[in-house]
């Protein structure tokens, strides 16, 4: 029988989304945790915008869910074929990042257990519908043709909705669990619930959405209450003041720390923008 | 008009897929593609569970032919009684693996785009059943109905069809969710066997390119014969776990379930191919 665990609510603060990125959908690279799990770092890269190809590395205190150090930014310039050119200032950027990673003891590649991945481009669990779509029959040389075709509408965007998202995962599989007659422990799991609700409208963006992210630990054989990992106030932080929606993209667990990377959608110039934020926390009672 | 964008979930650091588990579930590390995409390399390790008998293997694959570029390099499990012998074998394994990485131009970490990852630890899309379990509250044992995600870990003893839909390019303006690739994994009993416990299963994996119009013909990435190859003679189930795209090449890592010493064992296999054969063969 596993040791019963007590749940306490950790004080968790939002890690951030960079407002400096002007591009459409950002890229992310999770650099890793420190060996003791106290810190993590990740790099976000903007894409597509003519003006912004910036990349930035963020350093997060995983227990406080707050910046552990000021972020490091490299402003990109437009390169050939629209691809960013980071050569300008790249050496200094990398040197600064490496120094901060060393200071915080963050080990690149030490990403813990990668337990869940719901990438935006993975449409496998999106409901298929028939919709009119357009395509270019000969590259972009001829006008687009429109016709009805299968469509995984909504797969690339989740916003302006109060629909609750639940994800279920485990970080340890025991194929011989004595609690279930030596069968797999498929009744032990974590449940993350992301609930978006309308936030206070602001002059710049009008409609906005806030979130509450909770974690329920069903890995222990005791009735537990959800742990609030993140709960926004009515007024959103400046970095998310135009947020229209959220989606859980990936979850990592390292020792007793959890890192949940969220897609944050906002209104962009010609379509939605997407940036990342991370919510981190301590899973109380989890063995190291 | 905005250009199509390459997707964002490129993993540059590591591509280690390791299920934390007791018993014989393997772990896979995708080392990477060669710069030209012609080859890839990955390792599959298995502790062997309590019964021992684990191993560490490195595989080098010709991505266009979907076949081994060289025979797998294997390091048998540690033998507690002969540590010196294991150390020597380990050194030879490291040397052979490093030589093969050099020979095929494999770039460590050059894993391309991770287009889909349906990890064994993710049960979000599994329908749970209610099961009664013992819970303790204030020292008192109670029987409580809890959700049980049975079936989340092992696919076995029945024919299955699994689809993975993904798009490696998107357009946030057009929201082009009508352009995608469709992988279909079909598992059926081998010739002469039925859908029942103890049967072995073969598989076929097809790729439908729906990013172009009109849609190109369905292509087989892998199609087993009536009998299974020796390496998979134990297989009774399959599941697509991760899909990587690098240039014009695709690599699909599949969980292969079979009977281990006392329990279900899981190993990895990879199926590779070319995304668009009509394109110039160059990544």
Image (cartoon, rainbow, N blue to C red):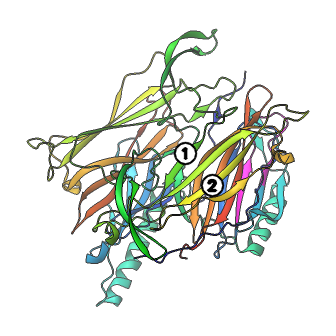
Using the rendered image of the protein, determine whether residue B69 is visible from the camera's viewpoint: no
Between B262 and A57, the one lying in front of the other is B262
> Above or below — where is A94 with respect to A20?
below
Of labels 1 and 2, the one closer to you: 2
Are the numbered discs 1 and 2 placed on the same chain, yes or no?
yes
Magenta-span inclusion, residue A131? no
Cα separation, mark 1 vs mark 2, equals: 18 Å
Quadrant holding the C terminus of chain A: bottom right
Q: According to the image, label 1 marks what residue?
A: A118
Q: Where does residue A162 sit, x and y in percent of width and height?
A: 66, 36
Q: Where does residue B262 sit, x and y in percent of width and height?
A: 21, 68
Quadrant holding the N terminus of chain A: bottom left
Magenta-span inclusion, residue A50? yes
Identify the magenta region.
A40-56
Q: Where does residue A277 sit, x and y in percent of width and height?
A: 72, 50
Q: Where does residue B73 sit, x and y in percent of width and height?
A: 34, 66
Which numbered dot is residue A214? Answer: 2
In which quadrant of the rendered view does residue B19 lie? bottom left
Residue at the image position 42 percent from the left and 74 percent from the top: B140
């Amino acid at each position: 029988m596993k040791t019963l665990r007590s749940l306490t609510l950790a004080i968790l603060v939002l890690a951030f989304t960079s407002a400096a990125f002007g591009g459409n959908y950002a890229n992310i690279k999770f650099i890793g945790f420190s060996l003791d799990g106290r810190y993590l770092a990740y790099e976000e890269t903007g894409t597509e915008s003519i003006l912004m190809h910036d990349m930035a590395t963020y350093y997060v205190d995983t227990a406080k869910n707050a910046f552990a150090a000021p972020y490091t930014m490299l402003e990109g310039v437009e390169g050939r074929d629209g691809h960013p050119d980071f050569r300008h200032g790249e050496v200094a950027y990398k040197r600064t990042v490496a120094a901060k990673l060393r200071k915080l003891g963050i080990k690149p590649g030490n990403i813990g257990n990668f337990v869940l991945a719901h990438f935006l481009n993975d449409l496998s669990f999106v409901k298929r519908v028939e919709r009119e779509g357009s395509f270019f029959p000969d590259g972009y040389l001829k006008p687009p043709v429109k016709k009805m075709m299968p469509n995984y509408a909504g797969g690339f965007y989740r916003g302006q909705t109060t629909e609750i998202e639940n994800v279920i995962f485990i970080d340890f599989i025991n194929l011989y669990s004595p609690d279930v007659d030596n069968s797999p422990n498929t009744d032990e799991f974590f449940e993350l619930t992301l609930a978006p609700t309308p936030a206070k409208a602001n002059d710049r963006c009008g409609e906005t959405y806030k979130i509450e992210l909770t974690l329920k630990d069903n890995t222990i054989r005791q009735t537990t209450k959800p742990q609030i990992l993140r709960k926004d106030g009515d007024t959103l932080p400046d970095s998310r003041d135009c947020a229209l929606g959220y989606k859980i993209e990936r979850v990592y667990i390292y020792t007793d720390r959890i890192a949940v990377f969220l897609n944050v959608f906002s209104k962009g110039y010609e379509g939605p923008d997407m940036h990342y934020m991370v919510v981190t926390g301590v899973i109380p009672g989890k063995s190291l | 008009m905005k250009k199509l964008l390459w997707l964002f979930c490129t993993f540059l650091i590591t591509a280690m897929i390791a299920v934390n588990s007791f018993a014989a579930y393997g772990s896979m590390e995708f080392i990477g593609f060669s710069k030209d995409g012609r080859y890839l390399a990955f390792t599959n390790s298995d502790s062997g569970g309590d019964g021992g008998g684990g191993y560490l293997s490195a595989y080098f694959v010709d991505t266009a032919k979907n076949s081994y570029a060289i025979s797998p390099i294997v390091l048998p499990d540690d033998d507690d009684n002969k540590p010196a012998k294991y150390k020597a074998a380990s050194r030879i394994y490291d040397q052979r693996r490093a030589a093969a990485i050099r020979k095929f131009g494999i770039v460590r970490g050059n894993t391309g785009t991770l287009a889909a990852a349906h990890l064994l630890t993710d049960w979000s899309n599994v329908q749970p059943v209610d099961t009664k379990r013992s819970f303790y509250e204030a020292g008192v044992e109670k029987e409580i109905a809890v959700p049980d995600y049975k079936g989340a870990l092992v696919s076995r003893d029945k024919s299955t069809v699994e689809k993975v839909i993904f798009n490696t390019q998107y357009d946030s303006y057009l929201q082009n969710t009508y352009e995608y690739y469709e992988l279909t994994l079909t598992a059926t009993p081998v010739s002469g066997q039925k859908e029942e416990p103890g049967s072995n299963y073969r598989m076929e994996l097809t790729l439908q390119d729906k990013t172009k119009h009109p849609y190109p013909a369905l292509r087989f990435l892998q199609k087993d014969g009536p009998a299974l190859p020796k390496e998979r003679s134990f297989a009774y189930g399959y599941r697509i776990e991760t899909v990587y795209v690098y240039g014009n090449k695709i690599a699909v890592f599949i969980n292969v379930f079979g009977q281990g010493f006392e329990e279900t064992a899981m190993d990895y296999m990879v199926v590779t191919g070319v995304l668009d054969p009509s394109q110039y063969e160059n990544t």
